[in-house]
Amino acid sequence: MKNKDSHLGKIVKNGRVLVLAMDQGMEHGPADFNERNINPEYVCGIAAKGGFTGFAVQKGIARHYKECYSGKVPLVLKLNGRTAIVPKDDIYSSPVASVKEAAALGADAIGYTLYVGSPREADMFRDFGAISAEADDYGLPVVVWAYPRGKYVKDEKSVESVSYAARVALELGADIVKVNYTGSVDGFRKVVAAAGRCRVISAGGSKQSDADFCAKVRDVLAAGGVGMAVGRNVWQHDNPMKIAGEIRKIIFK
């Protein structure tokens, strides 16, 4: 077995993380894209040049556009997914790729979404248990997208709900957990505390003004988070490299 800690160095730089995510094509559908960024080559170019510590995509993007990013940015391969067509009440994200496929594509880490509180929670935990064990065998770190979601969740962005999801990621063995920002430094500190030694990064969320987004990044770090997983706030931006540079300066100083 490979040394797992040695691989963390590829997606963690000086203790910080900045992932560019483009799994929205499956998770949200084409509505998130315009005529320019619907072309994966455009977003891959941003990932390759933007100084990110990871590029999170599904296996089809990783395979078809490998020459656009390989060797230029670490690959975080998402191993499960769903569409926005299925109602959130009974939400489930099924495995769509294996750790073996991730390794064959040169992945430096795997990504996996868990919907904590969904009626299908047990199924997702079972799937993830097998996948995380296989990731250990391959020496690949695990990044969990942990979202409280489903008919049993009253407020998926409350401090209590997000803290619970972060704790579940720790308990299940994630190395890094991606959660939604809870709106305040004090609230997010509780999320970070719940995650223990599992590193916490915040989702970027929907497009915001540059000032608001940069303030959010600073708040995440002030609360003890180690970085961000950004998507729309970068590749929907009129000047993606400019905003990527501003985020990079805040995170890596």
Image (cartoon, rainbow, N blue to C red):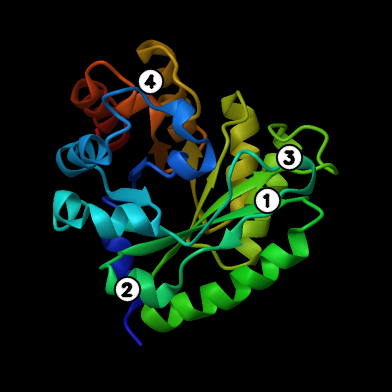
Tell which circle, 2 or 4, labels the residue nearer the N-terminal end.
2
Secondary element at image label 4: helix
Front disc: 4 or 1: 1
> Badges 2 and 3: C-beta atoms under 8 Å apart?
no
Q: Nearer the viewer, residue 47 or 253?
A: 47
Instruction: Please identify the quarter of the rendering in which residue 77 is found.
Output: bottom left
Secondary element at image label 3: loop
Q: Which of 89 and 194 is in front in this view?
A: 89
Say which mark, if any, is on residue 214: 4
> Badges 4 and 3: C-beta atoms under 8 Å apart?
no
> Badges 3 and 1: C-beta atoms under 8 Å apart?
no
Task: Judge from the rendering whether residue 151 lies leftward or rightward of residue 102; answer left or right.
Answer: right
Label 2 sits on what residue type? Ala
Label 3 sits on what residue type? Pro
Point out residue 226 in the picture as x, y percentages from the top left corner.
42, 43
**Mark 2 and mark 3: span between their CA atoms?**
32 Å
Tell which circle, 4 or 3, labels the residue nearer the N-terminal end.
3
Quarter of the picture holding the C terminus? top left
**Observer able to see residue 225:** no
**Mark 2 and mark 4: span between their CA atoms?**
34 Å
Tell which circle, 3 or 1, labels the residue nearer the N-terminal end.
3
Task: Judge from the rendering whether residue 33 lies leftward or rightward of residue 49; answer left or right.
Answer: right
Front disc: 3 or 1: 3
**Residue that label 3 marks:** 87
Residue drawn at the location 48% of the way across and 26% of the way down? 31
**Mark 3 and mark 1: span between their CA atoms?**
13 Å
Secondary element at image label 1: strand
**Residue that label 2 marks:** 103
